[in-house]
Amino acid sequence: MWKGTSGGEAISFSGCDDAQNSFDTLFLSWVGSTSVMTYCFIQAIQSGHGTTYGNILNAARSTI
């Protein structure tokens, strides 16, 4: 279905399947509650591994 955009690409990184719940924790972050996937994604970007989607995914997996 057309969503009113002019193109582009969207990539989704998810910590769980659609029928599952992803829980937050205070253990991983000093700024507030964060899910494991969000924490690992932020770590990948901050460490300079955000050049490609594959690099982000690999860095997040190695953090986990």
Image: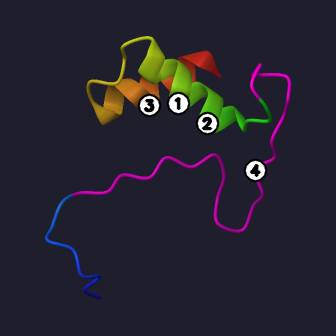
Residue at numbered disc 3: 57
In this picture, is 55 found above or below 22?
above
Residue depth check, mark 2 versus mark 3: number of the one nearer the observer: 2
Q: Give coordinates of residue 8: x percent, y percent.
A: 18, 60
Q: Which residue is drawn at 65% across and 22% down?
A: 64
Q: Which amino acid does label 1 sit on?
A: Phe
Q: Does the magenta stretch include residue 44?
A: no
Q: How far apart are marks 1 and 3 (CA)?
A: 8 Å
Q: Give coordinates of residue 9: x percent, y percent.
A: 23, 57
Residue at numbered disc 2: 38
Q: Give coordinates of residue 3: x percent, y percent.
A: 29, 82
Quadrant housing the N terminus = bottom left
Residue depth check, mark 1 versus mark 3: number of the one nearer the observer: 1
Residue depth check, mark 4 versus mark 2: number of the one nearer the observer: 2
Q: Tags 4 and 2 in contact by the CB under 8 Å rule?
A: no
Residue 22 is tagged as 4
Which quadrant of the view contains residue 31? top right
Q: Counting other residues with Cα less than 10 Å from the Cα at mark 4, is it few (<14), some (14-19), or many (20 or more)? A: some
Which quadrant of the view contains residue 57? top left
- First-in-chain label (1 vs 3): 1
- First-in-chain label (3 vs 4): 4
Q: Counting other residues with Cα less than 10 Å from the Cα at mark 3, is it few (<14), some (14-19), or many (20 or more)? A: some
Q: Tags 2 and 3 in contact by the CB under 8 Å rule?
A: no
Extreme-top residue of the structure? 47
Q: What element carries label 2?
A: helix
- First-in-chain label (4 vs 2): 4
Q: Which amino acid does label 4 sit on?
A: Ser
Residue at numbered disc 1: 41
